[in-house]
């Protein structure tokens, strides 16, 4: 897959990572354009079925990113997200989905550089990994 | 600590020993009603029945190998809110373990209920039960079943028991207030009553039964049963892993699924009051289906089958007790129990959790800690 351009769906929290993404943009940092950002109020409201649906519908990877532990605007949403993402990982990896296709990170509002780096690293990693199985043939 | 009592089997039938014990609970134990499997007159069907009059116990078949539904949800319903007296529920260990999960989710209560579990040699699925019971005296078949099943035969009367039961490593549960011991006993002579909790011992003091009976032989026999079933289970997991270790294999595995959601209805721990799959969340517009068909060339209908099962696993796999009612309810023979149990065997240990083990344990998705699972974010907090 020489010219493979991965599609990455990112669920980011309004208060930290979305702000960081905004900062990365206004700072004119160079980022891969493969990421589709979905702004959530909190990672604690990322339902496992959003992640599953994205991966079954052709996303090559899903990024969930929110505030650092202790910084959650809603006090503990990110702790709940961490358990849920762990659960989804345990389930999906059984069915041949590489665990690198589901990434959880904490990126604070002022970490624009870190956001850009995270995106670029993830895109490169998924380029090496190749397309997700569900992209080649619809899994329903 | 527990207290043991030997319950004599009059007429050489272990079921009658249990019936006599239930009668005693109603007459002297302060129990208002007993929930117990009982024959529905002349139909060959056995259903959980709420019995208040001791005379109505004559048709009760507490050890029958029929398993048309998990009574966990019924039991939860009977304990939600103001109790109308003490309820004694004769349930399979898997039903008790599922009930415990529902109690944790505030859908039932341990107050006002006496949980009674007989050692479970397994049961038939609905088809197996009909085959086994065909042409036999309904009140005599349980004894015939027990003779073979307790000896470790997977196919009493030539009919294979449900796979979920053959793979079940919980033939008994310590969560029950009272265990009725069948393993390690000569059940044609007596059944062992084991009173595990203070609540059960309080009831026992009113019954006028004399203590005595050996629980050690039973424990040894149970350990052997567990070992055999674990071997069967691990083999089943290996087969299922091989059949589903890629998304396409999983789609093939589930290809006969018609999205009827029977497995969800039959599941005792599928806890949502309204399932998202019966709402209009995934009820798409015609042009969307057309669009997907055009984009991929073809779209299997009904769609979202794999998505449904994966979402259900995210909801119930940490609470799955392995009762097998999902497979029993499937109209198209999709081996869903194998899939759900295999996943549960991954997700429960991931959170150091075991469904139904301890009423005081919190379900994994209902709690969190500040410091845990740092590996999820590459060790960064």
Image (tube, rainbow, N blue to C red):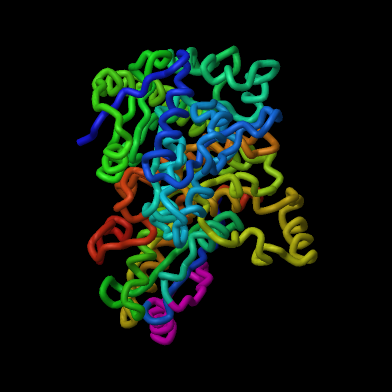
As displayed, is residue A134 above or below residue B158?
below
Direction from residue B121 to residue B160 in the image, left or right: right
Q: Is residue B167 left or right of residue B329?
A: left
In this view, the residue in front, A89 or B59, is B59
> In this view of the protein, which residue sits in the foreground, A106 or B119?
B119
Residue B122: horizontal and vertical position, in percent?
Answer: 48, 26
Q: Quadrant where the N terminus of chain B lies?
A: top left
- Residue B216 picture location, percent across and down: 24, 21
Q: Residue furthest bottom?
A: A26
Q: Is residue A134 visible?
A: no
Q: Residue at x 76, y 56 (%)?
A: B293
Q: Position of residue A12 (x, y in %)?
A: 44, 73
Choose top left, top right, bottom left or bottom right for residue B327: top right
Quadrant of the drawing holding the C terminus of chain B: bottom left
- The quarter of the picture where residue B41 lies is top right
Figure check: B133 above or below B355: above
Give the magenta-colored segment's residue range: A17-41
**Does the stretch in magenta take in A87?**
no
Q: Residue at x 65, y 53 (%)?
A: B304
Residue furthest to the left in view is: B1
| Residue B318 in the image: above or below residue B83 | above
Q: Residue at 44% of width from left, 38% of height from top?
A: B94
Question: Residue B378 location, x and y as percent?
Answer: 29, 58
Q: Is residue B10 above or below residue A68?
A: above
- Locate residue B144 relative to residue B378 in the image: left or right: right
Q: Is residue A95 in sight in this rendering?
A: yes
Q: How many marks?
A: 0
Q: Nearer the viewer, residue B153 or B118?
A: B118
């Amino acid at each position: 897959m020489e010219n493979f351009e991965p599609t990455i769906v990112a669920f980011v929290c309004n208060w930290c990572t979305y702000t960081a993404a905004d900062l990365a943009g206004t700072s004119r940092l160079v980022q891969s354009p493969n990421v589709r950002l979905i702004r959530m109020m909190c990672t604690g409201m990322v339902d496992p079925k959003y992640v599953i649906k994205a991966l079954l519908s052709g996303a090559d990877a899903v990024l969930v990113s929110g505030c650092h532990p202790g910084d959650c605007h809603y006090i503990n949403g990110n702790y709940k997200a961490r358990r849920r993402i762990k659960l989804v990982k345990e389930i999906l990896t059984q069915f041949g989905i590489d665990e690198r296709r589901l990434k959880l990170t904490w990126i604070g509002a002022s970490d624009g550089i870190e956001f850009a780096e995270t995106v670029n690293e993830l895109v490169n990693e998924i380029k090496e990994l190749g397309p997700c199985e569900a992209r080649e043939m619809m899994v329903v | 600590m527990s207290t043991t009592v030997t319950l004599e089997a009059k007429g050489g039938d272990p079921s009658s020993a249990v019936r006599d014990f239930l009668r005693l609970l109603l007459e002297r134990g302060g129990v208002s009603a007993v929930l117990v499997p009982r024959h529905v007159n002349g139909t060959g069907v056995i259903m959980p029945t709420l019995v208040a009059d001791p005379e109505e116990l004559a048709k009760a078949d507490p050890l029958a190998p029929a398993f048309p539904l998990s009574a966990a949800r019924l039991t939860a319903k009977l304990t939600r809110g103001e109790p109308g007296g003490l309820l004694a529920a004769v349930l399979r260990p898997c039903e008790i373990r599922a009930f415990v999960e529902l109690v944790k989710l505030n859908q039932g209560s341990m107050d006002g209920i006496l949980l009674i579990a007989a050692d479970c040699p397994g049961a038939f699925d609905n088809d197996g039960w009909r085959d086994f019971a065909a042409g036999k005296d309904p009140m005599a078949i349980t004894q015939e079943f027990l003779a073979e099943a307790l000896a470790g035969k997977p196919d009493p009367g030539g009919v294979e028991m449900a796979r979920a039961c053959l793979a079940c490593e919980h033939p008994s549960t310590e969560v029950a207030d009272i265990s009725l011991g069948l393993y390690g006993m000569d059940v044609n002579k007596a059944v062992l009553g084991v009173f595990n909790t203070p609540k059960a011992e309080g009831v026992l003091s009113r019954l006028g039964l004399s203590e005595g009976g050996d629980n050690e032989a039973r424990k040894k026999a149970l350990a052997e049963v567990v070992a055999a079933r674990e071997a069967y289970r691990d083999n089943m997991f290996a087969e299922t892993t091989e059949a589903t270790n890629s998304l396409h294999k999983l789609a093939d595995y589930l290809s006969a699924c018609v999205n009827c959601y029977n497995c969800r209805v039959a599941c005792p721990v599928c806890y949502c009051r309204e399932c998202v799959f019966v709402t209009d969340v995934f009820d798409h517009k015609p042009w969307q289906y057309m669009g997907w068909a055009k984009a991929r060339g073809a779209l299997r209908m009904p769609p979202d089958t794999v998505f449904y099962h994966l979402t259900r696993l995210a909801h119930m796999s940490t609470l799955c007790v392995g009762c097998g009612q999902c497979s029993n309810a499937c109209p198209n023979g999709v081996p869903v129990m194998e899939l759900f149990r295999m996943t549960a065997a991954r997700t429960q240990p991931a959170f150091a959790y075991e469904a139904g083990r301890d009423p005081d344990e919190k379900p994994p998705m209902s709690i969190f800690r500040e410091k845990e699972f740092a590996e999820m974010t590459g060790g960064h907090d």
